[in-house]
Image (cartoon, rainbow, N blue to C red):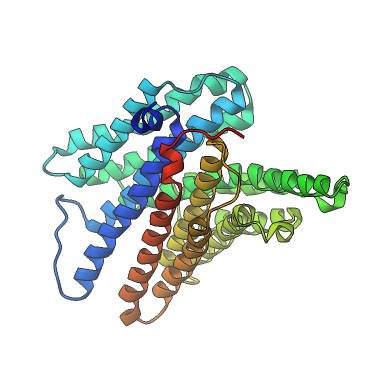
Amino acid sequence: MTALTRLFSEGFRIFFLLAGLWGALAMLVWGLWLGLQGWGGMMDLPNDLVPQWWHGHEMIFGFGSAAAAGFFLTAVPNWTGAPPARPRFIVLAAVLWAAGRVSVWLWGTVPGPVAAAVTLAFLPMLAGRITQQLLARRNGADIMFLGLLSLMWLAQIRVMLDFLGLPLGDAGAGLHGGIAVLIALIVVLGGRITPAFTRNALGRAASARGVVAAPETLPVQDKTTDRVAIGAAILAAAAITLGLPAPFAGAAQIVLGLAQLWRMRRWRGLAVRREPILAVLHGAMALVGLGALLQGLAAFGLGSQIGALHFSALGGVGTMVLAVMSRATLGHTGRPLLAPAPVVLAYALIPVAALIRWAAALGPLALYTPGTLLAASLWVLAFGLFVQALGPALLGPRLRP
């Protein structure tokens, strides 16, 4: 099997590689544009869109949807026992995703309605693939993911309608809503995998010492708090996407932030602090909670809304995407679950980038552009490190245990 054939043999391979590459490249383009604008230069993007909107759309619906596709195309067959997607489907999905990136990049050269139709086709294709598998299992908790993907598509539709100058379009609500949906997905999925992976690791560590792990040393999940966090995350995503009054969404985000941090109190995060591939999951979930609080407070006029939004996007979404992609890549290619040193460095860079971006929005105006560029540079470096370290695993054969 050649590297190219192998790349399209499993969904996580091509889509995690695309997420890593596009996450770095799209942010690099944005940083170059912003830097030149900030220092009196000029760099025109080859489209008719507001550059900030191109940046937001591509980081959410380009980078974010690629990461989601890689995860769902790999996880859903494991959940349901259904056959994984065939290479033909994976090739078509990857081509459609790439066509969406080109269509938005050349918006104006490519007629707007055509570009919008191509760009909007990817999420329904992904949802259609996993719908039959999830419905066959008839697990209500998993069916929820179809609702979240539908909400994400609605958020993208609002962006596209705004790009086209049509009624009901609102790029701001759509982009903000898209981030909120990604946060909701993380609240659900991260709430499953973080304590579960921690429990497994602590159990293995106890077995290696020849003992059985005591129940009080293992993570405990509070189902009531879990439901509150998940409900608040979905409510906030829906409210933002639909353009409901800011205080309504802000109240939901404050509840989400408090519930998210409270639910983590017994997940035993400190017990795995020396294992980066586990510690980063706890860190990402904490950043999701802090970001939700910052956004909720900003909705009531306390702090910078744009700073809080980027804290959630870079810190919560970026860190969790990096954590899940690296762990899944290692696990599904038969490699030890030990993050390579470049990936560990990437784990640290993303939260630092989020903190700097948030501070740049609060600090003096003169520091806004330098701070934003520094945060973008750290993001580019982090995802470049991911591609450099784990690209060979994504392209290479599965190792035998």
The picture places residue 153, in percent across and down from the top left corner, at: 39, 37
Work out whether residue 44 or residue 213 is closer to the camera in this orientation and state it.
Answer: 213
Compared with residue 328, is residue 273 higher up or lower down, i.e. above or below? Answer: below
Work out whether residue 343 or residue 141 is closer to the camera in this orientation and state it.
Answer: 343
Residue 61 seen in the current view: no
Residue farthest left in this picture:
109
Number of residue marks: 0
| In the image: residue 106, left or right of residue 370 | left
| In the image: residue 282, left or right of residue 38 | right
Residue at 59% of width from left, 42% of height from top?
189
The picture places residue 325, in percent across and down from the top left corner, at: 50, 45
Residue at 35% of width from left, 41% of height from top?
156
Compared with residue 304, is residue 346 higher up or lower down, i.e. above or below? Answer: above
Residue 200, by quadrant, is top right
- Classify the position of the C terminus by image quarter: top right
| In the image: residue 60, left or right of residue 289 | left
Residue 286, by quadrant, is bottom right
- Classify the position of the N terminus by image quarter: top left
The picture places residue 386, in percent across and down from the top left corner, at: 44, 52
The picture places residue 303, in percent across and down from the top left corner, at: 48, 72
Residue 71 seen in the current view: yes
| In the image: residue 61, left or right of residue 272 | left
